[in-house]
Amino acid sequence: MPEGHTLHRLARLHTEYFAGGPVRVSSPQGRFADHVGVDGRDFDHASAVGKHLFHHYEGGLAVHVHLGLYGFFDTHLVPPGEEPPAPVGQVRMRVGAVRPGVGPEDCAAHYVDLRGPTRCEVIDEAGVADVRGRLGPDPLDPDAGPDRAWARISRSSRPIGALLMDQKVLAGVGNVYRAEVLFRAGLDPFRPGSRISRERFAAIWDDLVRLMAVGVEAGGIVTIRPEHDHGDVPRRGADRPRNYVYQRDGWACRVCGDGIRSAAMEARTLFWCPTCQGG
């Protein structure tokens, strides 16, 4: 599942592509009938909170997208004088900039195709506020802080490994950031939230703020400190990021050499080092 940095990066890119002018919005798949409400409107900006993306339009309307497990955007840059490629497969929504002038030869234009989302709907700005209100603080929101999350964590008997994945506690943290930030903190993922100090959680929050900002800029999750990156080939393939513990179960810990373990925690697979995160 895409984590919060992916949605914030998409919001930045879509704002660059489309803000300040009208866009064509269509539903090649035919399952997003509400697209007619925003087709041809001026695209104001895109925003993100947690794992939710919003396209904001003139008149107070927004398209709300949740990518879920399998959703993603394809991006096409169409050169001057060419038409966009025909949609291939199950494209839920296509957004394309309206070129200035009278024809497609005037300038290049971006098109984005949305595939496989859990949610794609037109809502108003009150609906956007409602979605935001249901979520915990987002480490990528410069106006957010750890206090609301800490208030819930400090009263909870659930393990911190589960609490970090709860979007009502923290918005945007997924399985990779959960595993990696707990390793970097040297914290046992099974420790109850009520047994974690405020200072310890504040350090985790600060680390998430830094790591997720790097993820937005890099377009991928980067968590390994340079002294621990041995240039190995990740389990998921040479083109994938290197991690400390995520999907490295059975492999040696980069720091202590002990075997990385995995276990189910609230229907998701947790990864941790029993030595570096002992206790």
Image: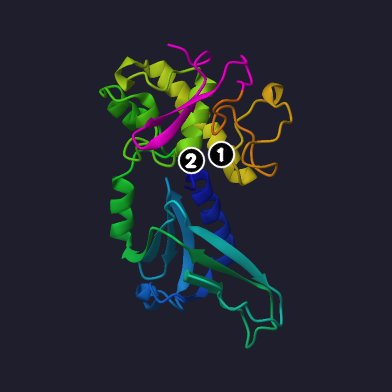
Q: Are marks 2 and 1 in contact (CB under 8 Å)?
A: yes
Q: In the image, residue 210 lies at what x, y percent?
A: 55, 32
SS at circle 2: loop
Quick check: is 267 in the magenta stretch?
Answer: yes
Q: In the image, residue 260 lies at what x, y percent?
A: 54, 23
Q: In the image, residue 62 lies at what x, y percent?
A: 38, 64
Mark 1: few, some, or many residues within 10 Å (few <14, many ≥20)? many
SS at circle 1: helix
- Residue labelled with disc 2: 140
- Residue displayed at 47% across by 57% down: 71
For this orientation, the residue located farthest to the front is 250
| Colour treatment of the image | rainbow
- Which amino acid type is shown beneath numbered disc 2? Leu
Tell me where residue 195 sits by quadrant.
top left
Q: Which residues are magenta?
A: 252-279
In this picture, is 54 found above or below 175?
below
> Which label sits on residue 213?
1
Q: CA distance from mark 2 to mark 1?
A: 7 Å
In this picture, is 18 found above or below 218?
below
- Horizontally, is 40 left or right of 151 in the view? right
Q: Main secondary structure of the magenta part?
A: loop
- Which amino acid type is shown beneath numbered disc 1? Ala
| Count of marks placed on residues | 2
Quick check: is 116 in the magenta stretch?
Answer: no
> Which label sits on residue 159?
none
- Residue displayed at 47% across by 65% down: 44
